[in-house]
Image (cartoon, rainbow, N blue to C red):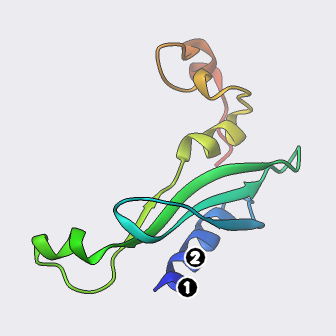
Amino acid sequence: SVRDLMGTFEEFYRQFGITDIQFKPHYNPYTEPSFELFGEHPETGELIEIGNSGIFREEVLSPLGVEGDVMAWGLALERLAMLATGAEDIRDLHGTLADLQFLREAEVPY
Protein backbone atom coordinates (compact mmCIF):
# COMPACT_ATOMS: atom_id res chain seq x y z
CA SER A 1 0.00 0.00 0.00
CA VAL A 2 1.01 3.64 -0.29
CA ARG A 3 1.20 3.84 3.51
CA ASP A 4 3.68 0.92 3.56
CA LEU A 5 5.75 2.58 0.83
CA MET A 6 5.92 5.87 2.71
CA GLY A 7 6.76 4.12 5.97
CA THR A 8 9.56 2.17 4.29
CA PHE A 9 11.14 5.39 3.04
CA GLU A 10 10.75 7.14 6.38
CA GLU A 11 12.53 4.30 8.18
CA PHE A 12 15.27 3.99 5.53
CA TYR A 13 16.17 7.68 5.59
CA ARG A 14 15.84 7.92 9.39
CA GLN A 15 18.89 5.62 9.50
CA PHE A 16 20.83 8.41 7.76
CA GLY A 17 19.58 11.16 10.05
CA ILE A 18 16.92 12.50 7.69
CA THR A 19 13.73 12.62 9.73
CA ASP A 20 11.61 15.30 8.07
CA ILE A 21 10.56 13.73 4.76
CA GLN A 22 8.02 15.34 2.45
CA PHE A 23 6.19 13.39 -0.23
CA LYS A 24 5.11 15.47 -3.21
CA PRO A 25 2.88 14.10 -6.00
CA HIS A 26 4.76 13.56 -9.22
CA TYR A 27 4.09 12.05 -12.65
CA ASN A 28 5.73 8.79 -13.65
CA PRO A 29 4.36 6.74 -16.57
CA TYR A 30 4.98 3.42 -14.79
CA THR A 31 3.55 4.16 -11.34
CA GLU A 32 0.37 5.59 -9.88
CA PRO A 33 0.31 7.24 -7.47
CA SER A 34 3.84 8.58 -7.83
CA PHE A 35 5.84 10.75 -5.42
CA GLU A 36 9.09 12.65 -5.24
CA LEU A 37 10.70 12.60 -1.81
CA PHE A 38 12.37 15.59 -0.25
CA GLY A 39 14.34 15.71 2.97
CA GLU A 40 15.79 18.54 4.98
CA HIS A 41 19.53 18.99 4.58
CA PRO A 42 20.99 18.58 8.10
CA GLU A 43 23.25 21.63 7.83
CA THR A 44 21.49 24.11 5.56
CA GLY A 45 17.86 23.23 6.32
CA GLU A 46 17.22 23.31 2.58
CA LEU A 47 14.90 20.69 1.09
CA ILE A 48 16.78 18.35 -1.23
CA GLU A 49 15.41 15.61 -3.46
CA ILE A 50 16.25 12.24 -1.93
CA GLY A 51 14.22 9.83 -4.03
CA ASN A 52 11.10 8.97 -5.95
CA SER A 53 8.53 6.25 -5.57
CA GLY A 54 5.15 4.89 -6.46
CA ILE A 55 3.02 1.80 -6.92
CA PHE A 56 3.48 0.07 -10.28
CA ARG A 57 0.47 0.44 -12.56
CA GLU A 58 -1.51 -2.72 -13.35
CA GLU A 59 -0.80 -2.45 -17.09
CA VAL A 60 2.93 -2.61 -16.33
CA LEU A 61 2.61 -5.73 -14.17
CA SER A 62 -0.06 -7.78 -15.95
CA PRO A 63 2.06 -8.65 -19.05
CA LEU A 64 4.56 -10.12 -16.58
CA GLY A 65 1.89 -12.19 -14.84
CA VAL A 66 2.24 -10.22 -11.61
CA GLU A 67 -0.89 -9.52 -9.58
CA GLY A 68 -1.21 -7.19 -6.61
CA ASP A 69 0.51 -4.02 -5.49
CA VAL A 70 4.24 -3.72 -6.16
CA MET A 71 6.28 -0.83 -4.78
CA ALA A 72 8.74 1.04 -6.99
CA TRP A 73 11.44 3.39 -5.80
CA GLY A 74 14.63 5.21 -6.62
CA LEU A 75 16.75 6.04 -3.60
CA ALA A 76 18.96 8.86 -4.94
CA LEU A 77 21.90 7.35 -3.07
CA GLU A 78 24.24 9.92 -4.58
CA ARG A 79 22.45 12.55 -2.45
CA LEU A 80 23.21 10.56 0.70
CA ALA A 81 26.80 10.14 -0.48
CA MET A 82 27.05 13.92 -0.84
CA LEU A 83 25.91 14.37 2.76
CA ALA A 84 28.24 11.64 4.03
CA THR A 85 31.35 12.90 2.21
CA GLY A 86 30.72 16.63 2.34
CA ALA A 87 30.68 16.91 -1.45
CA GLU A 88 29.19 20.21 -2.57
CA ASP A 89 28.58 19.25 -6.19
CA ILE A 90 27.05 15.96 -7.30
CA ARG A 91 29.48 15.88 -10.22
CA ASP A 92 32.29 15.35 -7.70
CA LEU A 93 30.89 11.86 -7.09
CA HIS A 94 30.14 10.47 -10.54
CA GLY A 95 30.36 11.20 -14.22
CA THR A 96 33.17 12.41 -16.37
CA LEU A 97 33.91 15.32 -14.03
CA ALA A 98 34.20 13.17 -10.88
CA ASP A 99 37.06 14.16 -8.62
CA LEU A 100 38.79 10.79 -8.18
CA GLN A 101 41.22 12.11 -5.58
CA PHE A 102 38.31 13.42 -3.50
CA LEU A 103 36.59 10.03 -3.76
CA ARG A 104 39.73 8.16 -2.70
CA GLU A 105 40.26 10.37 0.34
CA ALA A 106 36.66 10.94 1.45
CA GLU A 107 35.76 9.47 4.81
CA VAL A 108 32.33 7.89 4.94
CA PRO A 109 31.10 7.75 8.55
CA TYR A 110 28.49 5.01 8.06
Quadrant position of the N terminus in the picture: bottom left
Mark 2 lies on a secondary structure that is helix
Q: Amino acid at mark 2?
A: Met
Mark 1 lies on a secondary structure that is helix
56 over 80 or under it: above or below? below
Task: Tell me where residue 76 appears, x and y as whole percent.
Answer: 54, 48
Question: What residue is shown at x 63% (from left), y 46% (from top)?
Answer: 80
Res. 3 mark = 1
- Between 21 and 33, the one lying in front of the other is 33
Q: Is residue 104 left or right of residue 84?
A: left
- For disc 2, the marked residue is 6
Question: What residue is shown at x 43% (from left), y 59% (from top)?
Answer: 28
Q: How far is mark 1 from mark 2, CA to CA?
A: 5 Å
Task: Tell me where residue 99 appears, x and y as whole percent.
Answer: 58, 14
Q: Amino acid at mark 1?
A: Arg
Residue contact at pointers 1 and 2, CB within 8 angstroms: yes
